[in-house]
């Protein structure tokens, strides 16, 4: 039986955060690993669970988790020139709206390639 290789997502949150301010992404990734999860995959595949664990990383402070997501949306806007509504972005993650999150990230990826 062939061994399964660990799948790496196209958008790696840890790498993106490190590109903004190293070692933020690395440190957050370590915190998620301590909780037994891969931050990059969780963000894309289970956004509601990512949100729940993000609150844990912020010691139960939901306002800080929301603020982080809104800052993330703002940085995506600044880096690509494509407006990412911070409230809508945070809500998509919180609700676990994987389809909406993927649409946003795909648009961001296309804007970066232009």
Image (cartoon, rainbow, N blue to C red):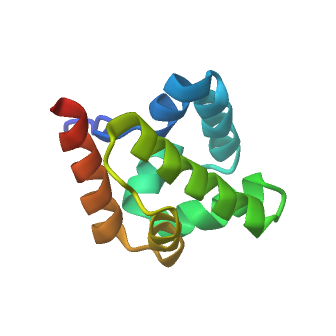
Where residue 6 appears, x then y in whole percent?
34, 37
Where residue 108 appears, x then y in whole percent?
28, 46
Q: Compare residues 80 and 1 and report the one nearer the observer.
A: 80
Where residue 21 appears, x then y in whole percent?
61, 25
Could you tell whether 102 is left or right of 17 in the image? left
**Residue at left offset 30%, top offset 58%:** 104
Outermost residue toward the bottom? Answer: 95
> Looking at the figure, which quarter contains the C terminus?
top left
Q: Quadrant of residue 56?
A: bottom right
Could you tell whether 104 is left or right of 95 in the image? left
Could you tell whether 72 is left or right of 1 in the image? right
Where residue 59 appears, x then y in whole percent?
84, 57
Q: State whether residue 89 is above or below residue 23.
A: below
Q: Is residue 38 visible?
A: no
Q: Compare residues 46 and 36 and report the one nearer the observer.
A: 46
Could you tell whether 2 is left or right of 12 in the image? left
**Residue at left offset 66%, top offset 35%:** 30
Q: Quadrant of residue 85?
A: bottom left
Q: State whether residue 62 is above or below residue 67.
A: below
**Residue at left offset 41%, top offset 46%:** 77
């Amino acid at each position: 039986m062939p061994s399964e290789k660990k799948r790496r997502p196209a958008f790696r949150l840890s790498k993106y955060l490190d590109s903004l301010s190293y070692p933020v992404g690395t440190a957050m990734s370590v915190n998620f690993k301590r909780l037994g999860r891969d931050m990059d995959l969780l963000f894309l595949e289970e956004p509601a669970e990512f949100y729940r664990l993000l609150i844990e990383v912020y010691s139960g402070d939901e306002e800080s988790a929301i603020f982080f997501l809104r800052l993330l949306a703002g940085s995506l806007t600044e880096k690509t020139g494509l407006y990412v509504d911070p409230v809508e972005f945070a809500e998509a993650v919180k609700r676990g709206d994987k389809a909406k999150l993927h649409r946003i990230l795909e648009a961001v990826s296309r804007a970066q390639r232009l």
